[in-house]
Amino acid sequence: MKRALLRLLAVIPVLLALSTIVFLAMRWIPGSPATSLAAGGNMNATAEEFTQSEERIRVALGLDQPLWKQYLTFLGDLVTLDFGTSFYGSNSVLKLVGEALPATIELTVAAMLIAILIGVVTGVIAAWKKDTVVDGAIRVGATVSFSLPWFALGILGVVVFGVVLGWLPIIGRLPNSLGYHPTTGFVLLDAILQNRPELVWPWVKHLILPATTLALSMAGFITRIVRTAVLEVLGDDFVRTARMKGLSESAVLRHHVLRNAALPIVTVLGLQFGALLGGSLITEMVFAYPGVGNLLVSAVHQRDYPIVQGAALAVAFLFVMVNVVVDLLYLVLDPRLRKVTA
Amino acid sequence: MSEQSALRVSRAAAPASGRAAALRRRYRLLRRPLALVSWAILVAVLVIGFFGPLVTDLDPLRQTREAFLPIGSPGHPLGTDDLGRDVLARMIYGARPLLVVSLVATALAAVLGIGIGLVAGYFGGRVDWWLMRLIDLAVAFPSILLIILIVAGMGAGETGLTLGIGLALAPGLARLARALALRESAKDYVSAAQIGGARTPGIILTEILPNVAGPLLAQSIMTLSTAAGFAAGLSYIGLGIQPPTPDWGYMVAAGQEFLFNAPRLVLLPALATLVFVVACNFVGDDLRDVLDPRSNR
């Protein structure tokens, strides 16, 4: 319990440091966002108009204040969840990020589930067929898997399953014709809450390609870990005992082997979540999937700095929180850790 | 970064036994042809990327009225794109930006990461603690987000992209270098050099570095594969090499509009990127077997 609390407290300095980096990155932009914004806004503006609009933006952004003052304002806004409004249109950043974040979480979680499924199955098969061609092929496949560039893989999926075979949709999250109005932003939850089961299947169909694209780059790690963990555990006494008790092979596998392999799997999931989240930023672009990645990248292109800042903070915070959850999961999965004092 | 940490986890957990050795042999037999093919691909892409533009008289920027010519058209072996530009020429010219960005970024990551890691591992104590907290901080961001932030700060283009990828990939190498330096500094030859009055930078560079260069070089090559993936991915989302300069990642993005009419416009650069990145990874794997025999894989 004490360990869990300490872990939660350790989040505060990390979050503070992350926010500071995002804050500085946004202010160290050459020529200041105001200049580029003024320049981008109107190509035909005269020098005078240009200076005026630049000044207006500087004041709007609070860039005329000294840096420490900007920083304090920034921290205050952060605590009150006030991230400002988009430069274009009047949408608040909180609203835009809040709408996009569930989509990204759905994508990442779906990818993770697919990766676990592929990884555990191939890892167990590789361990079971140790020293055979099957084992070797799976290991080579795993090596290929974790170097795959997401966007190229995604494009191949689009061409094969979307264009040539025409099985799966290649763009977006849900067809507009369905008239989806988010309550929580999570489609599955909303389908239950709003009693609209017809949302589920189109949603799944839209998720398959992007989630699998992401999952493939991660599955190889899980395959490796599962294979090693299973091989290691297979020789242990408790597995021999379980077999001697007359348990079937699949029962031994489920109750004894995989349970003990769970810890390294969780470790990899934690380590890989960042890569997955990062990958989703690019994968979303391939599929025009309306998540944080799409929002962030479009904002970078449009130099919409409040959104860049808000989206970056959201992704970074999500990442930190997942790492915390992973650490807490350790405590659940490995009772030995609970006794050790920090 | 996180990728590499995970690799180390799996390596540390690998059992070392006679059976494992037998398995490794069999596994290697399977991997060897792949490694050879990968070496060939890597060399081919390097040669095409750096020397292709010098020997070909095709122009990747010249627009013609003959848009969307199919593969095998006279004068345009790979056809033309939506603006009637020669696709073969664009493929040849498009390799270079990817190569330059990923090679320079990897070199940057190696110099920075290995430098920090060696210093931290050699000095230990407070220096080590602070340097490792710095690394932790860099790792607290997903790599892609870190790169996007740096590119957003510096403006889209090769410079920002290279710097971003270099910084994002340095932590993985720093951690490895630190672990190796920590192990080496406890050894007698380092004590001997210290007692002999050698200066600290000399000890780190001429005593420790040569002894840990193998694994570090192998890991750097693995990093090249990650760097290439990032470089292509960020160019694809428009934050890397800016048009009209041809680049594989950007070509995919530009071709996506014509997915149904001319899928080859995205397939060719996407496949080229995929094959190149995977080849880099196999080459790194192969090099590690040679350079880092202790790695228990």
Image (cartoon, coloured by chain):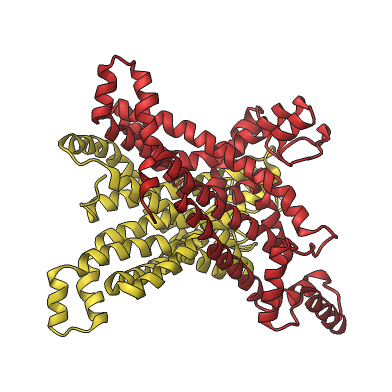
Residue A59, quarter of picture: bottom right
In this view, the residue in front, A318 or A147, is A318
Residue B2 coordinates in the image, percent (x, y): 44, 53
Residue A78 coordinates in the image, percent (x, y): 69, 64
In this view, the residue in front, A6 or A310, is A6
At x 35%, y 71%, the residue is B128
Chain B palette colour: yellow
Residue A323 seen: yes
Residue B39 seen: no
At x 66%, y 43%, the residue is A287
Above or below A125: residue B197: below
In this view, the residue in front, A263 or B85, is A263
Q: In this figure, what is the number of numbered marks?
A: 0
At x 71%, y 34%, the residue is A189
Q: Is residue B113 left or right of residue B297?
A: right
Q: Quadrant of the C terminus of chain A?
A: bottom left
Q: Is residue A192 left or right of residue B61?
A: right
At x 41%, y 72%, the residue is B130
In this view, the residue in front, B81 or B99, is B99
Q: In this view, does B40 lie to the left or right of A51?
A: left
Chain A palette colour: red
Residue A76 coordinates in the image, percent (x, y): 71, 69
Residue B90, quarter of picture: bottom right
Residue B44 coordinates in the image, percent (x, y): 40, 52
